[in-house]
Structure formats: C-alpha cells, structure tokens
Amino acid sequence: MNLRDVKTEVEELLDAYVQCLDDGRYEEWPDFFVEENPVYRIISRENHDRGLHLATMSCESRGMMEDRVVAIRNAVVYSPQYLRHLVGAVRVTGQEGDAYKIQSNYAVFNTMRNEETRVFNTGRYLDEVVFVGGAPKFSRKVVVYDTVQIPSMLVIPI
C-alpha cells in the first residue's frame, strides 16, 4: 500500500474514532484497536518530552478499555457534557514492520449544559496503525496533551 493510500485510510479511521467519542458511543471505542495487546495512553507533554511514563490514563489491553467504558457508564459521576473533536495535520511519519507511525493534531471543545463552549484539551495523537483484514486499527494510541491544567477529572478517552 502506498503512503497516500495509508494516509487516506488513517484519516478515515481518525474521523470515525472522534465521531464515535463525540456521539458518546463509548462501547464502540475499543473496537478501533487491535485485539492483541493494544495500548492507549493519555500523557502530558511535559512527561512525554522528558521520557517519563506517568500517564493520566493508561489502558494496556482491550479488557482495560472495556472496564473504562463500564466505569464511564456506571461508576463515574460527571456533569453531562458535549464534546467536539477536530483533528488535522495528519502525517505518516514512518513504518516499522506492518505498523505505520502516524502523528496528528487535535483540539477538543467542551460544552456543558447552559454554559458557553470552551477548549477542553489540545495536543497531538501519536499513533501506530496496522491493517487487520484490510481495515486500519490502532495498535497504539498515545494522546500527548499540551493543556497544562485539565478540567477536574479526565474521565473519557480523547
């Protein structure tokens, strides 16, 4: 597959991924990842740049992702909100074996009921994407956020 085709497929994957989150279809979130040993992390830019591995959120398996969804739906209490992701500047930055390294920028806007929309979080996605049965899946998704202070509790995936 040439890099232009990979980029197009990855852009469609990212579009579907953020639409899923914006629609609140969290039960579908783990389906964007490979079955075997997927990694999802949200980490501050400061920690990432310093090579520190302390993440704000970390899931090292589909089971952990599914547990996160159960917590969102049943255990965690947070104010109703609407999120809107914007993703751009998608680049294929390399390839290791069958995994393509992808970098893109994101901004997430948050609207609480009866409040103005505000910027919730900004940063970049550092992804590794593989093709499973011809369809792109994340094998690794690291969300590196620029925002120094995130709102009280980061509950849902970015």
Image (spheres, rainbow, N blue to C red):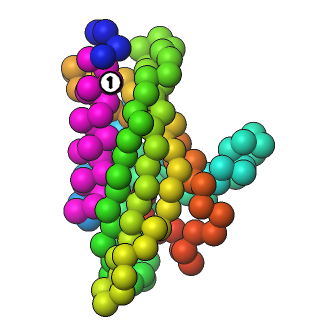
Q: Which residues are magenta?
A: 5-23
* Residue identified by numbered label 1: 7
Position of residue 13 relative to residue 3, above or below, is: below
**Where on the picture, by quarter, is residue 133?**
top left
Residue 39 in sight here: no
Q: Quadrant of the C terminus?
A: bottom left
Q: Residue furthest bottom?
A: 114
User: Magenta stretch containing residue 6, yes or no?
Assistant: yes
Task: Give the residue at x 36% y 62%.
Answer: 69
Position of residue 73 relative to residue 86, above or below, is: below
Answer with left or right where residue 120 lies relative to residue 84: right
Task: Give the residue at x 66% y 49%.
Answer: 45
Task: Give the residue at x 26% y 65%.
Answer: 24
Q: Position of residue 53 (x, y in %)?
A: 70, 46
At label 1, the amino acid type is Lys
**Where on the picture, by quarter, is residue 85?**
bottom left
Q: Position of residue 10 (x, y in %)?
A: 31, 30
- Classify mark 1: residues with Cα within 10 Å, few (<14), some (14-19) or many (20+): some
Position of residue 149 relative to residue 96, above or below, is: below
**Where on the picture, by quarter, is residue 50?**
top right
The tally of labels here is 1
Position of residue 84 relative to residue 75, above or below, is: above
Q: Position of residue 93 (x, y in %)?
A: 50, 22
Q: Main secondary structure of the magenta part?
A: helix
User: Magenta stretch containing residue 96, yes or no?
Assistant: no
Q: Position of residue 36 (x, y in %)?
A: 41, 32
Q: Quadrant of the N terminus?
A: top left
Per the image, label 1 sits on a secondary structure element best described as helix
Residue 87 in sight here: yes
Answer with left or right where residue 88 lies relative to residue 133: right
